[in-house]
C-alpha cells in the first residue's frame, strides 16, 4: 500500500511540473506591456462606453452624474446632458476629433469637439445607432424630425 501512495504522490508531482513547464513555455512566446490611459471614477463610469482613439493616444467614456450624463475626453469632463447616445463617444479615424449623440429635453443632436449641431427628434444609423466618421473631417448619421428622416452629413472645419 505505501508503494501506491508513493506512486500517487509522484504522479501528482510530475503533473504539476509538467503544468509549470507548459505555462513557462507559453508565457515566453509573448511580451506584455501596460500603460495608464485613464483614471476613472468607478461609481460614475458607464463601462461599455470606454473608447480609445485609433492611434491609442486618447481615451473617452461616458459618466453618469445624478440623473445626467457627460462625456469625459482625456480626463476632461464635457457638458452634462440628459442622455448620451448609444455607441458614443467615437473618435475620428486620425484620433483628433471626438463625436457623440446627446439629448436635452426631447431633442437629440451631434456634439463634435464640444460643439453642438442641429436638433432632431432622434438620431440613428442603420448600423447599430451610431454616428460614423467618413473621414477625419466629415461624419454622418440619420436623424428623424417628425415623420421625416434625414441623412445628416457634417463637414468639420
Image (cartoon, rainbow, N blue to C red):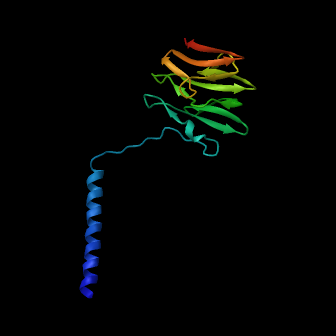
Q: Is residue 34 left or right of residue 40?
A: left
Which x, y percent locates residue 5?
28, 83
Which x, y percent locates residue 125?
57, 23
Q: Is residue 61 left or right of residue 55?
A: right
Q: Residue 19 appears in which quarter of the rendering?
A: bottom left
Q: Residue furthest bottom?
A: 1
Q: Is residue 37 left or right of residue 9?
A: right
Q: Residue 9 appears in which quarter of the rendering?
A: bottom left
Which is more toward the observer, 94 or 124?
124
Q: Is residue 147 left or right of residue 93?
A: right
Which x, y percent locates residue 42?
60, 45
Residue lying at 63% horizontally and 37% vertically, measured from the top left: 63
Which is more toward the observer, 140 or 96?
140
Which x, y percent locates residue 41?
61, 43
Residue lying at 61% horizontally and 35% vertically, measured from the top left: 62
Residue lying at 57% horizontally and 29% vertically, measured from the top left: 89
Q: Residue 149 appears in which quarter of the rendering?
A: top right
Amino acid at each position: 500500500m505505501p508503494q501506491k501512495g508513493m506512486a500517487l504522490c509522484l504522479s501528482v508531482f510530475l503533473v504539476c511540473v509538467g503544468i509549470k513547464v507548459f505555462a513557462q513555455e507559453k508565457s515566453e512566446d509573448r511580451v506584455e506591456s501596460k500603460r495608464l490611459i485613464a483614471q476613472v471614477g468607478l461609481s460614475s463610469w458607464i463601462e461599455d462606453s470606454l473608447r480609445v482613439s485609433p492611434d491609442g493616444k486618447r481615451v473617452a467614456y461616458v459618466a453618469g452624474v445624478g440623473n445626467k450624463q457627460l462625456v469625459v475626453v482625456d480626463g476632461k469632463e464635457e457638458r452634462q446632458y440628459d442622455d448620451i447616445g448609444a455607441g458614443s463617444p467615437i473618435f475620428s479615424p486620425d484620433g483628433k476629433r471626438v463625436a457623440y449623440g446627446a439629448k436635452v429635453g426631447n431633442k437629440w443632436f451631434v456634439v463634435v469637439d464640444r460643439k453642438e449641431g442641429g436638433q432632431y427628434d432622434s438620431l440613428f444609423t442603420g448600423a447599430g445607432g451610431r454616428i460614423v466618421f467618413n473621414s477625419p473631417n466629415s461624419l454622418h448619421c440619420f436623424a428623424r424630425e417628425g415623420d421625416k428622416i434625414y441623412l445628416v452629413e457634417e463637414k468639420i472645419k
